[in-house]
């Protein structure tokens, strides 16, 4: 049985050690007693656990873990099949032992937009909320943080991340099988929080921002990225059922509205540093993600509208500080 939990939280003096230990005991049990489909996923992700990469590069668009000449032809073919079985790959790209994974999202583009606006990450304790397979956590790793904790409640992403981390041998990236609503377990620990692609999925975005703030150390930086609607008025769209075909979407704000939420949640120095239109060059179907993607979510007659007739999404990026 591989280890899916860590003790890094013991080094965080403000974390609730007792409750986190109880959560980790629960995760260990859960991983052992999974339903058939999830067990199959775990077994796949563990199949090549013996591979340890020599060549690592997290500073380029594709997260590179291992090179082609580090593994045999047989291992390459087997690993390729396993990675294909772990479909869909939503975030990427990755290059794993020479295998290129062209994920649905070109997540490197989001990272490039963030990069000039980031605080120094070296030696910092960072949270990546909604960390998915860990793409951004690996990008953060090239900045030498002390610890990056991903919050991701879904087991499929959790297993894929653990597979990637095992290949990489990194020890300063951890993923918790927890949601943003559980960040309070860490107390005021995080120097930097990335809250990307989360707020429009929360029933109460303001409460969510407040919960995140409680988990941040005074003076810490929050980076927020969200779907948004165009316009300067401080308003949010509340779709009847789905927005761009995605269920579980609640409030889709304008940039100004999101700025106000952050200010009212208690952040200071809140600024919008980037806003751009979405496009099918950044989010699209590939051989590693064969389901519907951006172009299926947009009105084919009018690209300024979603298929439901709502304004097509922008992406906005903001940052703010937790006052000392
Ligand atoms: C839209 S994706 C954004 C992924 C990534 N942060 C990015 O910006 O590309 C939302 C992610 O949040 C995860 N998620 C779902 N519920 C969550 C929760 N309650 N707390 C934190 N993450 C959650 C999903 O599994 C998914 O990986």
Image (cartoon, rainbow, N blue to C red):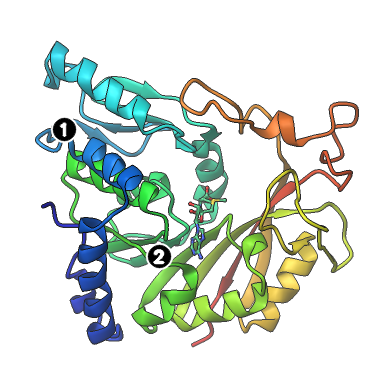
Q: Which residue is mark 1?
A: 48
The image quarter containing residue 31 is: bottom left
Q: Is residue 314 left or right of residue 68?
A: right
Would you say the beta carbon of the disc 2 residue lies within 8 angstroms of ligand 1?
no
Q: Which mark is residue 211?
A: none
Element marked by disc 2:
strand
Residue 56 visible here: yes
Q: Is residue 181 left or right of residue 231?
A: left
Q: Could you say which disc has been placed on residue 127 in the image?
A: 2
Going by the picture, which residue comes out furthest to the front? Answer: 36
At horizontal 68% and vertical 52% (from top left) the residue drawn is 247
* Residue 216, above or below 145: below
Image quadrant where residue 224 sits: bottom right
Q: Secondary structure at mark 1?
A: loop
Crowd rating for badge 1 (residues with CA inside 10 Å; few <14, some 14–19, many 20+): some
Q: Give the left or right position of residue 56, taking residue 35 as reference.
A: left
Give 302 or 119, whichever is nearer the viewer: 302
Where is residue 139 shown, x and y percent of the image? 38, 45
Which of the two residues, 42 or 37, is positioned nearer the viewer here? 37
Whether residue 172 can be seen here: no
- Residue 142, percent from left and from top: 31, 46
In the image, is residue 181 above or below residue 66?
A: below
Relative horizontal placement of residue 62, taking residue 244 as reference (left or right) = left
Above or below, comparing residue 46 to residue 316 in the picture: above
Q: Label 2: few (<14), some or many (≥20) within 10 Å?
A: many
At horizontal 19% and vertical 38% (from top left) the residue drawn is 167
């Amino acid at each position: 049985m591989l280890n899916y939990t860590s003790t890094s939280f013991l080094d965080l003096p403000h974390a609730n050690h007792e409750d986190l230990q109880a959560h980790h005991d629960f995760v260990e049990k859960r991983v052992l007693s999974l339903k058939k489909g999830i067990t199959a996923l775990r077994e796949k992700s563990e199949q090549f656990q013996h591979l340890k990469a020599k060549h690592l590069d997290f500073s380029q668009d594709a997260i590179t873990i291992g090179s082609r000449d580090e593994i045999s032809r047989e291992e390459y073919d087997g690993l390729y099949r396993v990675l294909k079985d772990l479909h869909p790959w939503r975030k990427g790209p990755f290059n794993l032992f020479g295998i290129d994974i062209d994920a649905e999202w070109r997540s490197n583009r989001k990272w490039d937009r963030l990069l000039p606006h980031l605080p120094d990450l070296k030696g910092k304790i960072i949270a990546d909320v909604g960390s998915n397979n860990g793409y951004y956590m690996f990008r953060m790793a090239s900045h030498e943080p002390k610890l990056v904790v991903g919050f991701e409640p879904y087991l499929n992403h959790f297993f894929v991340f653990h597979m990637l981390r095992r290949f990489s041998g990194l020890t300063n990236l951890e993923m918790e099988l927890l949601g943003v609503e559980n960040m309070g377990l860490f107390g005021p620990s995080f120097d930097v929080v990335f809250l990307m692609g989360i707020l429009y999925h929360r029933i109460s975005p303001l409460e969510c921002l407040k919960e995140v703030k409680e988990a941040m150390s005074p003076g810490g930086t929050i980076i927020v990225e969200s779907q948004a609607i165009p316009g300067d008025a401080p308003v949010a769209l509340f779709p009847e059922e789905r927005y761009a075909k995605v269920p579980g979407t609640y409030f889709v704000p304008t940039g100004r509205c999101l700025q106000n939420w952050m200010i009212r949640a208690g952040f200071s120095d809140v600024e919008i540093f980037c806003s751009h239109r979405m496009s099918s060059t950044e989010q699209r179907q590939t051989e590693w993600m064969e389901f519907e993607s951006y172009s299926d979510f947009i009105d084919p007659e009018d690209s300024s509208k979603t298929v439901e007739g709502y304004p097509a999404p922008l992406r906005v990026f903001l940052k703010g500080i937790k006052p000392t």
